Image: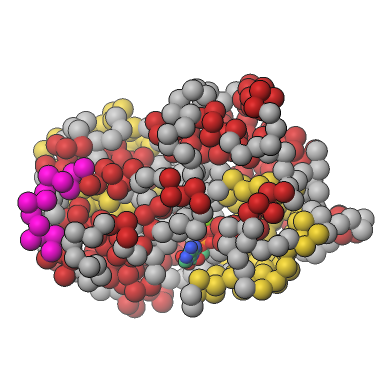
Amino acid sequence: MSFEFGKEAGMVPMLSIRDIHKSFGNNEVLRGINLDVYPGEALALIGGNGAGKSTLVKSIMGVYKPESGHIYINGEELEFSKPAVSLNKGVYLVPQEPMLFPNMTVERNVLMGFRKTYAVLRENLIALMNQLGWKLDLGRSARTLSIAEQQLVEILRGLLREARVLILDEPTSALTFDEVNALFKIIENLKQKNISIVYITHRLNEVFMIASHVALMKDGIITLQGKAGEFTREMLVKGLLPDDYSGRKFEAKKTRAPAGIRPVFELQHYSGYGFEDINITIHEGEVLGLAGVVGAGRTELAMTIFGRDSVKSGRALLDSEDITGLRTRQIIKKGINYVCEDRFLNGIFRTTSLAGNITSSCLRLLSLFFLSFVSERTLAGKYVKDFRIKTAGIEQEIGSLSGGNQQKAVIARALTTNPHLVILDEPTRGIDAGARGDIYAIINELKTRNVAVLLISSDIEEIVELSDRAITMFQGHIKAEFQGEDITQDNIMRASFGVIHGDAV
Ligand code: ADP
Ligand code: MG
């Protein structure tokens, strides 16, 4: 898989990466990356969670500084860790996590940071939006946007850039099918204009729709690369699996307490925005793992259960009581709490200058509810001790804690409401191994207290290690349920990508 059209023709790659190494502390995340992308090529960069994809593209964009290696843009060496230099050379990254200025309008957010005159830019933007057919009010304040809308804004920014190397890091995770199709038409045009695209995605269909080339990345190295036509869906799924994907390694370590038989929480034919006809039951002391790729509808489901989005049809029962459609405050009172996914919480994006302007909606949501429990300070103190949260005291601003400690604090906050069901959404995303172990211990502790846990995680090892039962969601539907010995990385991975028993969906 090494024949390259561009190479053969003696062309200079638009983007060339040589032996890039990057560590965070002792964690070597990029272990010698080599890649070439020629003009007009679209490279799909595929890899499991934590493979290092975002770290790689942030290194190209100058957000992170690799320890060694070289990056060339059209043959010219790129100076590390200088976003302005990368921009000047025509590199643009649409980040995985939208980073907008919440107080500015959509228009200001898109048009910020260009050299061209504003009127021209605005015309270009309107023309682009017409071409895309995306519906987005330019005058809206960014703080009112959903995640999907924020993603649209970030993509618009990238498309207007006229970059020579346009990198998109999981840009479509929250977009609808039509929005994605419109985007792909534009990307096709960019390819025709000889722009090089690096496209990170979890959606395998997308790979075959837009990529001319594919690179599989695992544990900080590129394990396989070649033309898209040389890859099958099955190969991509395999490429995403960890080496020891039989899952046996984790089977041995598991200490599953037998779950009680009393159902705590039930969803019956539950439908809402982003998911349909969901049926699940969680018993007391049981961890139900909910796996699936970004965009499968898991967070939407959680947000709806938690009263943040409206229910279209079906029922939610807590301790046999119908709680369908209640508002968040009542839901919490009834006995559910939700620790939402929030990447900003995990400190991953602090290195970027924009991040300082972003307030965490998740954190705001939680502190709102926490304030009413401030009287239970002793309880908070108890959790700080139990969870080994390293703070200067419970008064310390949560934002000044390390990522792992922030996450433990957030879980502790959620538990102060005495929930019967706790929904944990990506609880260990981006945190270090020590804190991860503590969070696993917290989850096991919840089980012994008969709390029911819905564990949403893109980390399949985590699902395998912690779940008593595991379900996978794919494109808004529950795709498969696994119990006991069947909870393996291989089974869950296949179901998460819609490949069950070898059938491609
Ligand atoms: P991917 O995008 O492929 O899911 P990432 O590049 O986000 O992977 O992460 C790769 C690894 O690097 C993970 O183990 C993650 O925890 C770690 N990591 C990423 N960013 C940081 C950071 N700013 N500080 C410390 N560790 C990080
Ligand atoms: Mg990433």
> Quarter-wise, where is residue 231 in the image?
bottom right
Q: Nearer the viewer, residue 402 or 340?
A: 402
Tell whether 139 sits left or right of 273: right
Quarter of the picture containing the N terminus is bottom right
Please say whether residue 204 is one of the residues in the magenta stretch: no
Depicted 226 relative to depicted 167: above or below: below
At a point 28% along the width and 57% down the height, the residue shown is 398
Q: Is residue 377 magenta?
A: yes
Q: Nearer the viewer, residue 450 or 412?
A: 412
The residue lying at 70 percent from left, 71 percent from top is 69
Query: Residue drawn 36% across and 54% down?
Result: 345
Q: Position of residue 415 (x, y in %)?
A: 17, 55
State which region is magenta: 368-381
* Secondary structure mainly formed by the magenta segment: helix
Q: Where is residue 200? Give x, y as percent.
A: 60, 51
Query: Residue 379 lies in what quarter of the image?
Result: bottom left
The one nearer the camera, 490 or 55, is: 55
Position of 77 compared to 308: left or right? right
